[in-house]
Image (cartoon, grey):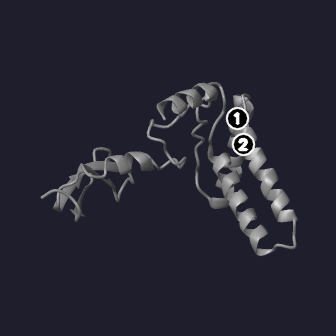
Amino acid sequence: MNNFRYKFSQFMQGRYGMDQLYYALLVLYLILLLLNIIFRRVMIFGILAWVVLIFAFYRFFSRNISKRSRENDKFMQLFGKLTGERLVNFGGFNGGGFTGDGFGNSGRSGSNGPGLMTKIREFPEKKYVSCPKCKATLRVPRRRGKHTVRCPRCSNRFGINIIIGKK
């Protein structure tokens, strides 16, 4: 398994990889696939689904990093206008260079916590909580009971209750 990971990481050197537009294209693909299942007689959904999937993989394996990054920036601006959120481009898988804090942010400017895999890996020892004032993600030891936590960013004190953890 490690040999496969090594070879895949070598293959991905200099390629763009995943970004927000890639994920949006995959969601669009799944929606078109679902519409294709519902409306069997209309073949346009199936054709569009394949076109979207091929374009998503084309972007993923592309070596033109600056062009893919500009496409993602335009998508983020459009998506930000539609949702009313200020979004940040976090770059590609390998070549784009993550501009966040190294935790694999979701791309929102207020998000600052670790990714899902880190949370799952650290579940037995750590609990992640959000500061109600500044929305910073804090990592606290997983000890059962009620605790008071002070946010290092804004110095806000708030209470948490940990149900699952060590005594």
Residue at (62, 43) in percent of width and height: 19
Assign the C terminus to one quadrant of the image: bottom left
Badge 1 density bin: few <14, some 14–19, many ≥20, Cα 10 Å: some
Name the residue carrying label 1.
61
Cα separation between marks 2 and 1: 6 Å
Residue 36 percent coordinates (x, y):
78, 68
Compared across the picture, whether 40 is left or right of 27 comes to right
Query: Does any portion of residue 113 appear in the rendered image?
Result: no
Compared across the picture, whether 49 is left or right of 76 comes to right
- Please tell me whether residue 127 is drawn above or below residue 38 in the rendered image: above
Residue 4 percent coordinates (x, y):
54, 32
Query: Does any portion of residue 52 appear in the rendered image?
Result: yes
Residue at (82, 58) in percent of width and height: 48
- Please tell me whether residue 4 is drawn above or below residue 44 in the rendered image: above
Residue at (72, 42) in percent of width and height: 57
Q: Secondary structure at mark 1?
A: loop
Q: Which disc number belongs to residue 57?
A: 2
What amino acid does circle 2 point to?
A: Phe
Q: Nearer the viewer, residue 2 or 144?
A: 2
Residue 148 percent coordinates (x, y):
19, 57
Instruction: Determine contact: label 2, label 1, CB under 8 Å.
Output: yes
Residue 105 percent coordinates (x, y):
49, 45
Compared across the picture, whether 23 is left or right of 41 comes to left
What amino acid does circle 1 point to?
A: Phe
